[in-house]
Image: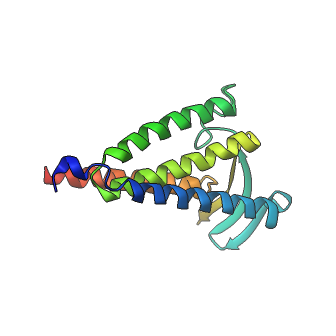
Amino acid sequence: MTRGRSRGRYMGLGALLFVLVLAADQFSKYWILSVYDLPAKRSVAILPFLNFTMVWNHAVTFGMFGHSGAGPLLFAAVALAVVCALAVWMSRTADPLVAAALGAICGGAIGNVVDRLRFGAVVDFIHAHAFGWSWYVFNVADSAIVCGVGVLLLTSLSEGRRG
């Protein structure tokens, strides 16, 4: 098969990851808010190094630009533009890992856009901590975005060694 024909071959894989991440993210947030009722509990120890802690994130990421005056619609519009660009990349890639990573990133980004449009903020609730160290509170969408970017970086580095 020629390289040109293989482009877009893994769009289905990327789309599958997109749907799985989006579904897992939205289901976890529904469960945390409506079934577990974390907003009323605020923070619950799950394991010695893991809490469910309710945070409404009005910022972009890691608390950045939270007080810039820009609203959830602006953040959502920027995220949608990025997702469109990543979807074009996904449609053109001949690498299944890249397609899967892009699908995961897009699913996570859309999951957080849904929150911004529904609630005006992103639902964050996973709080990892150990030995006095504490990470930012995050969610399934954030995890998928970080893992997807990690895969893209590793794939890029391995291509650099081959080329």
Instruction: Classify residue 98 as left or right of residue 58.
Output: left
Give coordinates of residue 121: x percent, y percent.
Answer: 71, 42
Give coordinates of residue 75: x percent, y percent.
Answer: 61, 33
Q: What is the quadrant of the N terminus in the image?
A: bottom left
Q: Is residue 72 shown to the viewer in this render?
A: yes
Give coordinates of residue 76: x percent, y percent.
Answer: 61, 36
Instruction: Classify residue 32 as left or right of residue 140.
Output: right
Q: Is residue 80 above or below residue 131?
A: above
At a point 62% along the width and 40% down the height, the residue shown is 63
Give coordinates of residue 144: x percent, y percent.
Answer: 51, 56
Q: Quadrant of residue 19?
A: bottom right
Q: Is residue 85 above or below residue 26?
A: above
At a point 70% along the width and 58% down the height, the residue shown is 29
**Residue 47 or residue 140, whichever sits in front:** 140
Instruction: Classify residue 82 as left or right of residue 2.
Output: right
At a point 30% along the width and 48% down the height, the residue shown is 93
Q: Quadrant of residue 23?
A: bottom right
**Residue 24 or residue 46, whichever sits in front:** 24
Residue extending farthest to the bottom is 47
Residue extending farthest to the left is 163
Q: Is residue 132 shown to the viewer in this render?
A: no
**Residue 101 or residue 132, whichever sits in front:** 101
At a point 73% along the width and 51% down the height, the residue shown is 55
